[in-house]
Protein backbone atom coordinates (compact mmCIF):
# COMPACT_ATOMS: atom_id res chain seq x y z
CA UNK A 1 0.00 0.00 0.00
CA UNK A 2 1.40 3.40 -0.93
CA UNK A 3 2.25 5.90 1.81
CA UNK A 4 -0.66 8.18 0.84
CA UNK A 5 -3.05 5.25 0.95
CA UNK A 6 -1.84 4.30 4.45
CA UNK A 7 -2.32 7.87 5.67
CA UNK A 8 -5.81 7.96 4.22
CA UNK A 9 -6.66 4.60 5.80
CA UNK A 10 -5.25 5.72 9.15
CA UNK A 11 -7.47 8.82 9.05
CA UNK A 12 -10.46 6.67 8.14
CA UNK A 13 -9.71 4.24 10.96
CA UNK A 14 -9.32 7.07 13.46
CA UNK A 15 -12.66 8.48 12.29
CA UNK A 16 -14.23 5.12 13.09
CA UNK A 17 -12.60 5.14 16.54
CA UNK A 18 -13.97 8.67 17.06
CA UNK A 19 -17.49 7.60 16.13
CA UNK A 20 -17.28 4.49 18.31
CA UNK A 21 -16.08 6.43 21.36
CA UNK A 22 -18.93 8.88 20.94
CA UNK A 23 -21.53 6.14 20.45
CA UNK A 24 -20.38 3.45 22.91
CA UNK A 25 -18.33 5.24 25.55
CA UNK A 26 -19.52 8.89 25.77
CA UNK A 27 -18.89 9.34 29.51
CA UNK A 28 -20.20 12.91 29.58
CA UNK A 29 -23.32 12.24 27.52
CA UNK A 30 -22.77 14.52 24.53
CA UNK A 31 -23.39 12.09 21.67
CA UNK A 32 -26.53 13.88 20.51
CA UNK A 33 -24.88 17.31 20.32
CA UNK A 34 -23.37 18.03 16.89
CA UNK A 35 -21.12 20.78 18.28
CA UNK A 36 -19.51 18.20 20.60
CA UNK A 37 -18.46 15.80 17.83
CA UNK A 38 -14.79 16.46 18.64
CA UNK A 39 -15.15 16.09 22.41
CA UNK A 40 -13.07 12.90 22.67
CA UNK A 41 -10.55 13.64 19.91
CA UNK A 42 -7.70 14.06 22.42
CA UNK A 43 -7.98 10.35 23.24
CA UNK A 44 -8.24 8.84 19.76
CA UNK A 45 -4.54 8.56 18.93
CA UNK A 46 -3.62 6.78 22.16
CA UNK A 47 -6.54 4.37 21.88
CA UNK A 48 -5.66 3.71 18.23
CA UNK A 49 -2.03 3.00 19.13
CA UNK A 50 -3.09 0.71 21.98
CA UNK A 51 -5.34 -1.16 19.60
CA UNK A 52 -2.98 -1.62 16.65
CA UNK A 53 0.62 -1.02 17.67
CA UNK A 54 0.52 -2.46 21.18
CA UNK A 55 -2.25 -4.98 20.48
CA UNK A 56 -3.68 -4.17 23.90
CA UNK A 57 -6.32 -6.45 25.36
CA UNK A 58 -9.93 -5.51 25.70
CA UNK A 59 -9.41 -5.23 29.45
CA UNK A 60 -6.42 -2.87 29.05
CA UNK A 61 -8.34 -0.59 26.69
CA UNK A 62 -11.38 -0.59 29.00
CA UNK A 63 -9.16 0.30 31.96
CA UNK A 64 -7.59 3.12 29.93
CA UNK A 65 -10.99 4.55 28.99
CA UNK A 66 -12.20 4.27 32.58
CA UNK A 67 -9.02 6.02 33.76
CA UNK A 68 -9.52 8.87 31.30
CA UNK A 69 -13.09 9.38 32.47
CA UNK A 70 -12.34 9.24 36.18
CA UNK A 71 -8.88 10.81 36.43
CA UNK A 72 -8.88 13.30 33.55
CA UNK A 73 -12.55 14.18 33.19
CA UNK A 74 -13.31 13.96 36.90
CA UNK A 75 -16.31 11.66 36.52
CA UNK A 76 -17.15 9.59 39.57
CA UNK A 77 -16.35 5.91 39.21
CA UNK A 78 -19.57 3.92 38.90
CA UNK A 79 -20.74 0.64 37.41
CA UNK A 80 -22.34 2.20 34.32
CA UNK A 81 -19.09 3.96 33.44
CA UNK A 82 -17.19 0.70 33.80
CA UNK A 83 -19.76 -1.03 31.57
CA UNK A 84 -19.53 1.72 28.93
CA UNK A 85 -15.75 1.52 28.98
CA UNK A 86 -15.85 -2.27 28.61
CA UNK A 87 -18.44 -2.11 25.82
CA UNK A 88 -16.41 0.48 23.90
CA UNK A 89 -13.21 -1.53 24.37
CA UNK A 90 -14.88 -4.68 23.12
CA UNK A 91 -16.18 -2.88 20.04
CA UNK A 92 -12.73 -1.41 19.40
CA UNK A 93 -11.03 -4.78 19.64
CA UNK A 94 -13.63 -6.17 17.23
CA UNK A 95 -12.47 -3.53 14.70
CA UNK A 96 -8.82 -4.58 14.93
CA UNK A 97 -8.99 -7.23 12.15
CA UNK A 98 -10.60 -4.72 9.78
CA UNK A 99 -7.94 -2.12 10.56
CA UNK A 100 -5.13 -4.64 10.06
CA UNK A 101 -6.14 -5.66 6.55
CA UNK A 102 -5.62 -2.13 5.24
Image: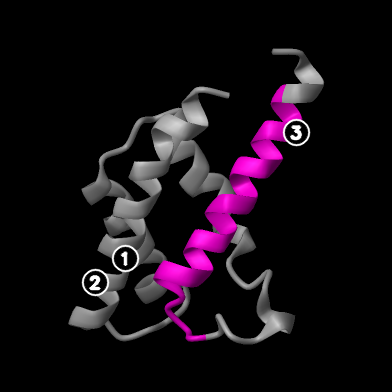
Q: Which residues are magenta?
A: 6-29
Q: Is residue 12 above or below residue 53?
A: below
Foreground of the two, 29 or 16: 16
User: Disc 2 or 3, which lies upstream in sequence?
Assistant: 3
Asked which secondary structure carries label 1, the reply is: helix
Q: Which residue is mark 3?
A: 8
Q: Is residue 31 left or right of residue 64?
A: right
Is 76 left or right of 72, judged from the image as shown?
Answer: left
Please identify the quarter of the rendering in which residue 40 is found: bottom right
Q: Main secondary structure of the magenta part?
A: helix
Examine the image and state in which quarter residue 12 appears.
Answer: top right
Position of 23 relative to 76 (above/below): above
Q: Total marks drawn?
A: 3
| Whole-number angstrom distance, CA of label 2 to CA of label 3 | 33 Å
Q: Residue at x 57, y 62 (%)?
A: 19
Label 3: element kind: helix
Image quadrant occupied by the N terminus? top right
Residue under numbered circle 1? 85
Q: Is residue 80 above or below residue 85?
A: below
Mark 2, other Cα within 10 Å: few <14 / some 14–19 / many ≥20? some
Residue identifier under label 2: 82
Amino acid sequence: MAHGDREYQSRENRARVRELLMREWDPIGVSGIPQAADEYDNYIDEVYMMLLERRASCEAIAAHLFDIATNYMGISAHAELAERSARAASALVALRPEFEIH
